[in-house]
Structures are given as C-alpha cells and as structure tokens.
Amino acid sequence: MLKRVVSIFVISLISSTFWSNFAFSEAMVWKVSNSLGELYLGGTIHMLRPTDYPLRPEYGAAFHDSDTIVFETDMSAMLGIGFQQKVLEQMRLPQGQTLKSILNAKTYSRLTQFLEQRGIPITGFDSFKPAMVIMTLTLTELQKIGISPTSGVEIYFSAEARKHKKALSSLETADEQLAVLTKMGEGYENAFIEGSLDDFENLEAEFEVLITAWKNGDDKKIDEKMTQTMKGRFPDMYNTLLVQRNFNWITQIKTLITTPEKEFILVGAAHLAGADSVQNLLRAQGYKVERLTLKQQLDPQPKIALSEQLLSEPIIQSQ
C-alpha cells in the first residue's frame, strides 16, 4: 500500500463564483525582467480536480511565449522506481525508534483513532516519520473529495511541454526536495501531528478557499491562509520549506534570466505570497516584477483546452 501511496505522492510534489468574475480577477503569473532578459513566474496548486480546468489564459500566454518550462523539482526523477524506494528509506525512523516512542500518549492515541476510523492500522506507519504519515493522509483525504496530484498544474504542463516540444528543467533535484520534506515535523512531532489532524476536520472547505484564491490571483489570501498560518504554527517548517528554498531559487533565476531562451517557472503558490515571496526577493535585488494580464476581455466560461486557446497579446501591470 505504501509504495502505491509513494507513487502518487511523488507526482503531487512536484493549492461557481470564480468563472462568473473571471474577467475582473487576476492570475498568479508575473513577468520578471532586467536589462539582461526576461522570464515568467507562475504559481501552482500541486493537486487539483479535473473541473478546475481550463486554467486562466495568462498561464497559456506565458507558456506559449516561453521556450523552457521550469518546475520546482525534477518530476521525471521523482517518478522513478528507484526514487520511490529512496522515499520509503529516508522517511523511516532511525533504528530503535517508532512512531509510538516519539509521540506522547495523547497524540498517538488520537492518531490511532483517526486511522482506525478509516480502516487503516497504525502498525503500517509505526516505523515512519510523522512527515510520511501526514503526507500520506493528506493525499488520501484530498482524493476522497476528488482532488488528485494527477490533475495538478505540474502534471498538466509537463504534458503540454512534451506536446509542444518545449524543454523541461527544474530549480532543484528530487533528492534536494526529499531532504527538505523528510525534516517536516522534526523537533515538534506532536504539534505537527495534532495540527494536521485539526486541519483534516475542515479540509474540504479550506481547500476550496485556497483554490478559489489561487484562481483569482489573490496572493494576499494565500499568504493569509498558507504562509502566515505556517509561519505562526510551525516557524521552522516555514523557514525550511519556503524561505530558504526561495532564496536558493533566486540564485538560479538570476542565471536563467540571462539565457537566450525564455523560461516559464512554475512553483507552488505559497512561494509567491507574503513578505518572503520570490517576487519580493527579486524586487529587492533590482528586478522588475509585473503582473501579467491580457488585453482583451475573455469568455468567462471558455470551452476550449488551454493549448488551443486564441491568446491575445499580453500586457503588464506593476504589482
């Protein structure tokens, strides 16, 4: 079972009223430029529903105007059988430790009850780190409400890039991302498990808020619901998962912007929200960062696939 979960999980790593207000909202897509060149920066949700497509046309405009699509990590490497085995190995607790031994009795009991209610024996997780437990449960809980990594933005644009013969690249290796993920919850295991179980109680409603904010380009709402929440509850995770990686990526973006090719960099929406966002770090180093918008008002309910849309000439708004 765990291997199947890991197979789904590594895909994901690589997030009504929205469409009625489509013409009056924005997309989480920016143009970054300086005297040496330009590229696009787009926010993603790693797991979506098929009904969340088509994407906003700004994503299509950036995609079609780019030569290379850059993701957070090397998705093809993450899908390899060897890497899936590595995930299982690195997510295991050190010899002599068990989940029961590192959690207090109250947290372990609550987790046990949560799993039992879903027909999952906790013994299957007892040799794994809290990070593995929570990531697995997050996947299973989201899939219950129709949200899947196979419908995520990265999977979509991987297919589109192959279809249009665009190059693919990444900001970090699969091993680098795994090293970050395995540390989630370290040193605050009980709080991490308890907080995650709290979140599962209202997961569907909270995810709906998040996905609507992303569709509307509302980075302030994403900052409120994701980055500020993480910073307040788990400051170490905020620093490791978001801030440090954002700083690491800036170095690569500075190189990419000088290449003859134009890149469309796609990263999780939380990296593009809040005071420590990639955009703010770039602005602080003198780069011009502008919101991408489109000249013509588009059909609020487009019926054609993103790759087939007739996209108008993009215009830019400073934001």
Image (cartoon, rainbow, N blue to C red):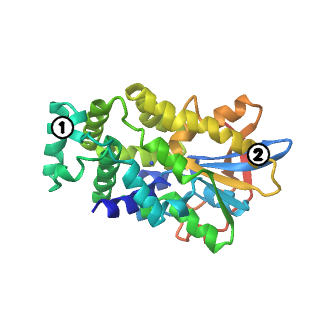
Front-most of 19 and 213?
Answer: 213
Residue 271 to residue 158: above or below: above
Q: Position of residue 225 (x, y in %)?
A: 42, 36
Helix, strand or loop for disc 1 = helix
Q: Position of residue 282 (x, y in %)?
A: 70, 35
Q: Residues within 10 Å of mark 1 (few under 14, many from 20)?
A: some
Observer able to see residue 93: yes
Where, quadrant-wise, is the C terminus in this rendering? top right
Left or right, 274 with reference to 224: right
Residue 15 to residue 274: above or below: below
Front-most of 13 and 20?
Answer: 13
Left or right, 206 with reference to 273: left
Classify residue 289 by image quadrant: top right
Q: Which residue is labeled 2 in the image?
A: 255
Helix, strand or loop for disc 2 = helix
Q: Position of residue 237 (x, y in %)?
A: 44, 33
Q: Which residue is labeled 1 in the image?
A: 108
Which residue is at a point 62% across and 74% down the rendered structure image?
A: 163
Number of numbered discs overlaid on the protein picture: 2
What separation in Å lies between label 1 and label 2 (alpha carbons)? 47 Å
Tell which tag, 1 or 2, sits nearer the viewer.
1
Label at residue 283 = none
Which residue is at a point 54% across and 32% down the rendered structure image?
A: 274
Residue 40 to residue 301: above or below: above
Q: Position of residue 99 (x, y in %)?
A: 24, 41
Front-most of 205 and 300?
Answer: 205
Which residue is at a point 29% across and 30% down the rendered structure image?
A: 191
- Residue type at mark 1: give it: Tyr
Q: Which badge, 1 or 2, comes first in the chain's sequence? A: 1
- Residue type at mark 2: give it: Thr
Observer able to see residue 301: no
Where, quadrant-wise, is the N terminus in this rendering? bottom left
